Amino acid sequence: MTSPILEVHNLCKSFGGVVATDNVNLQVTEGEIHALIGPNGAGKTTLISQLSGLLTPDSGSIFFQGNDITGLPPYRFSQAGLARSFQITSVFQELSLQDNVALAVQAHAGHAFRFWRNARKDQALQKPALDYLSRVGLADRADWLASEVSHGERRQLEIAMALATDPVLLLLDEPMAGMGKDESAELIDILNRLRGTKTLLLIEHDMDAVFALADRISVLVYGKVIASGTPAEIKSDTRVRNAYLGEDDN
Amino acid sequence: MNPALKNTSTAWLSVVMVVLLAAVPYVLYVSGNTFWLDIFTRLVILAIAACGLNLILGLGGLVSFGHAAYIGIGAYAVGIPAYHETYGGLDAIASYNGFVHLGLALLTSAVFAFITGVISLRTRGVNFIMITMAFGQMMFYAIVSLETYGGDDGLTIDLRSELPLINLDSPLSLYGLCYVSLLVIVFFTYRIRHSRFGLTLQGAKSNEERMNAIGVNCYKYQLTAFVLSGVVCGYAGFLLGNFTTFISPEMMDWTRSGEIMFMVILGGAATLWGPVIGAIIFIVLEFVLSEYTVYWHLPFGLLLIFSVLFLRGGVTGALHRLGKPAVRSQS
Amino acid sequence: METSILFIQLLNGLQLGILLFLLSAGLTLTFGIMDFVNLAHGALYMLGAFFCATLTLYTGSFILAVLLAIPLTALAGFILEKLVVQHLYDRDHLDHVLATFGLILCIDTMVHIIWGPEGMAIPLPDFLNSQVELLPGIVFPTFRLLIIAIGLIAAAGLYILVNHTRLGMLIRAGASNRTMVGALGVDIRTLFSGVFALGAALAGLAGMLIAPITEASIGMGSDIIITTFVVIIIGGVGSMKGAFLAALIIGLIDTFGRSFLDDIFKLVMSSEAAETAAPAVSAMLIYILMAVILAFRPQGLFPPLTR
């Protein structure tokens, strides 16, 4: 645990009078798995979207590895080393799993102004692509189309794609959403294996998953971070219990 | 469809196409049916234009509705220098030299595509359709207003482009040039489709937000594809000008753009030979229907509507679906 | 002299702008509410003109013909919507474009079969076929004034529709999703057919108003539809207010370009060069304007909120 890799200062975002992000301050430390929890409508996805550049905050700033990246276009966020997965699975449905990951490998490798050589026979692309697929347990599905595999497998694919851009920080928006128990367990396992090599910021509803994974937790309610701390601290925090855990869990 | 199976069927289709487009017109021409060679020449030129459009429409998923403008640019790049060589004026470009014509056609197409692409590619969906349409029509009106080159009435090309080794006045040589050009362009699109560049375009077509999320700025790739696409259509225009020797703004009217788009979609966008098959279907329909009635646009329009309503993915797509095994079961 | 020409061209530009607004209003409705791209909108404009021409011939009254032709064009739009358009709402824009392109071919050919290849002139009654002296020394055709008046009335009607009805709420929100329409508690299919018919009637009305000046002809729709698209793009696709303002801007700029550009060019270049360049530039003027506006505002001047 060293310095914060991601620092968010006084971030605000509202949509036509509705405040979705209200003066949020957040710090993610290098190497940790940081979970962001909160009730529905707390503004978690809005926050993640700002952290990945898809939304531009109204005010406040985002520092990543010491650089101010507020307001840059989304592809610059990714180039800076922030990768995200989406709450609603977002992959290239018409392409094979291997092509999906190859695109991410290629994106990380730099420009794609190569018009002649067959990318599907390009070992510099396909070998790492296959490698990332096997890391999430999808190697045997490599030539299937993304539209042909199960929902859980598409989520795994998303993580493989995010990993393929070799990010410093992974933003995962409800990776377990819509998964069965077995699939969730497998994904928790995959994410656990990333511990220490990547920094993870994850939004999750599944509290079992959160407490199984997170080093630290931040609680977002009505656009505000009301608490940040270790799982034990969060569990015993009365504000959190009142605002969130109390009414939701037991 | 199984990728290996698909590859073999594409390979067979390629063999059939290559042989058919060479043998049939040659035999017909030698046996005295010169009229048929004209039909085939027009077919191949339209197929080249359709392949050009397919680069942006099929591969990039961007519905550009102004590609007839590039055909016009290519054709006038033959007509205008030839006109000035005959009647004087504009010494800078006046020439019968084919390389001057070709260079002008490709360069002007590229510049026009670049300028309009820079602006229109910042938009998507319906805006993009209408903007490309408007830019295409701008070119149409620009040519109409140029009285020197006949305006509305068009311009007759007195002398075809002069090229070394190839005499474009010979119908067979002209066809040969068109035929070889088509094969080169089909092969070129095949390589592009499977290159990193092509993969990027297909990714952008499939899910642009995701491309951004993995760190790719799609704009510059789409702009490159847009320019390439315009240049190929400009080249088709260069050939068309030399073929018809009469050019008019009518060839760049927006309904012409619609016809090229019809070819790409009906033949099956995003497939290798789809645009060529589409051009064949178009020519056959035009020929057969206009035999029966001068009002052939009516059944043609109906067919277009029906194919949109009932035939998704074009003819090639429908054929593929026929031969496609049931969706893979989860194992 | 100079100012009187300027004034008359101002009115001419206004009249063209009003016409363009009638056309773009229909497109904005179908696009704003149904998210449907209708290339065949120009064909409805043409149909309106031909209906009106024939009815004028039979009834002997242009006014009566217009009153009959408006519901007739609306009916044509209604039938088209039921037969073809309705099945395309769920499809992507490419399918809209192709199918309505097919519709254009069909409608153009049918008009050719029914009315022949020649255009049809529409005679105006005497009280319209006259000129009024607006200011001392400035006379202007009565009929063109009428076009402006009718267009403004239609614009006022649409203003009320957009700003004071629940249907208008959808347009203002730029909403093209069915859940929101469903939330209004109306039958979606009927609503969509009705909106399409209304758009058709507006396009038809524009055709009826221009036909006495230019005559009804095949291809009149294909020419004007692109200009209408330019209007919509500049105004911001889906915005009624944008369509109105952009229509007036385009009408004025096009008219002024065609009448004054050669004089302006002659100030800076030889008159020979000006006479070559002016028509070319004035023909491209509105497209250049579109390009410049889009370079700064890719979504047009007044984009709806959610798009």
Image (spheres, coloured by chain):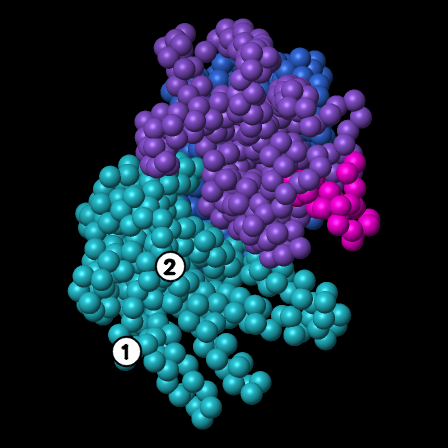
Residue holding disc 2: C23
Residue B193 position by quadrant: top right
Residue depicted at x 28% and y 78%: C126
- Residue B74: x and y, percent? 66, 39
Under tag 1, what secondary structure?
loop
Q: Which mark is residue B64?
A: none
In magenta, the rendered stretch is B73-97
Q: Earlier in the sequence, mark 1 or mark 2?
A: 2
* Figure chain in cyan: C
Chain A colour as displayed: blue
Q: Do the residues labelled 1 and 2 touch (CB within 8 Å)?
A: no
Please, which chain is the residue tagged with disc 2 on? C
Task: Tell me, yes or no, if residue A195 can be seen here.
Answer: no
**In the rendered image, the vertical position of residue A149 relative to residue C259, given as above or below:** above
At x 57% / y 72%, what residue is drawn? C259
Decide whether the magenta segment is chiefly helix, strand or loop. helix
